Amino acid sequence: MKRPPERVMHGPIERPTLDLLLRFDRHTETRYESEHGAERAAELRHTILFGVVLYLLHDVSTYLLLPDEYWLIVLVTFLVIVPCSLTIAYTVEKVSAEIREVMVLGAIFAATMLPMFMLYYSDAPHSSHMNVEVILCIVFANMLMALRFRYALLYTAVVLFLGVLAVTMKNGVDLELKAAICFQFASVCLLSVYSNFLFERRRCTDYCVSREATIRAETAEMSEKQFQEISKTDALTGLPNRRFIDERFQEWFADTRPAVVMMIDIDHFKLFNDTLGHPAGDECLKTIADAFKAAFSGSDVFCARFGGEEFILALRDAEERQARRLAHGVVRSIEALNIPHPGRTDGVDVVTVSIGVAFKPAAKQVTQEEVLSDADKALYQAKRDGRNCYVTSTDTASPRVMAKF
């Protein structure tokens, strides 16, 4: 059988954390990406494709504002902006989260730089109105594409700086108009990055709350399972207890597989306690229990404390000959522990056990109580036979052969 799990004490729940840039701690970020990464990548792909269509449609307004540079803008759009955007759109699902977000940041930077450059470079009469194209890029990046806040902050700061620089260095524009355009840039940047912050904070805090609720539920479930395991474990020996025996036997006796049940009793245990004291008796029980734990493990075998100085050893699919060998081995192995027993008056000076063996046949329906009763009768016969031996229920049902070896 498997050794019963030790009790695990849980400390306070470690809540997912966010820093000032709305970054999860490493563990939470990994979990979030595993749960929502594919969804984020799909959303980005759709948003980028929509952005490409919108970007191309705005070539109409670009033609009206900058007729002299129109074909240069079209050339850059179709040879640089569109291919790069489409490549990123179909790559975001195949890369890590960090690379994905950096690629998206690079794409929107590239898309913004073209109208930004034309705002500064063009001498067309209406070129100052290219600020609207830049503003649309800012809104698209921070609100529709929803860059992660740290990237949105970086993108917005750089675009604001370059936009103000482009406007102030542009020739042929009145100072009042330059000031108005700079104010527009600053207002849109502040509005969009703040909106991004609110959206990202809600996304992150909602996940933190749901994750904490999940952790609490998992912890409660684990605690319940541990409590159930503890309730099935004998506190002194660490072996399964009567409750475990009853639950396991309900399963075993409900099918047709054969099984062997051995009732094991420590010989003259009362004399052991009377001579050496109950603390020594407890240590004796622990020593024997440890021997059982080391010897018996698996899904089809278990050893449990039945009560007092009695143990139950049960296994499935064993023939009578195999059961006899096992019972004999248990008797000899406990004797070989050489636990001193000075209180005995039968000439034996170490702790020994007696075993009663009973069988659950495959072809006959029997109850748990019947098999335990047979094992108990065989055990008492082993006691009458002089202890330090085993007796089977088949021995008690017919002229017996002594089970001592």
Image (cartoon, rainbow, N blue to C red):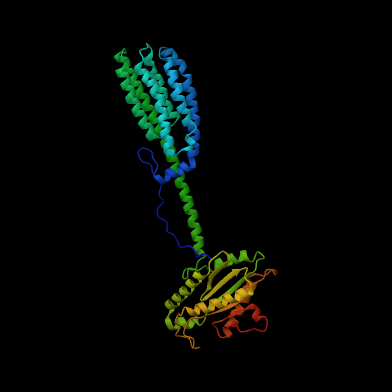
In the image, farthest residue toward the right: 363
Horizontally, is 193 left or right of 2 in the view?
left
Horizontally, is 321 left or right of 207 in the view?
right
Q: Quadrant of residue 299?
A: bottom right
Horizontally, is 82 left or right of 193 in the view?
right
Please tell me which residue lies in front, 214 or 330: 330
Quadrant (top left, top right, bottom left, bottom right) of the N terminus: bottom right
Horizontally, is 395 left or right of 206 in the view?
right
Residue 4 vertical placement versus 125 (above, below): below
Q: Is residue 16 visible?
A: no
Please tell me which residue lies in front, 156 or 208: 156
The residue drawn where x is 40% and y is 42% is 24
Quadrant (top left, top right, bottom left, bottom right) of the C terminus: bottom right
Q: Estimate the x, y position of residue 73 in percent, counting from the top left.
A: 42, 18
Q: Estimate the x, y position of residue 227 in percent, counting from the top left.
A: 49, 60
Q: Estimate the x, y position of residue 252 in percent, counting from the top left.
A: 62, 65
Residue 188 vertical placement versus 365 (above, below): above
Q: Is residue 135 visible?
A: yes
The residue drawn where x is 36% and y is 24% is 187
How many numbered tags mark residues here? 0
The residue drawn where x is 58% and y is 74% is 262
The residue drawn where x is 40% and y is 34% is 102
Q: Estimate the x, y position of residue 56 in percent, counting from the top left.
A: 48, 20
Q: Quadrant of residue 131?
A: top left
Q: Quadrant of residue 324?
A: bottom right
Residue 62 vertical placement versus 404 (above, below): above
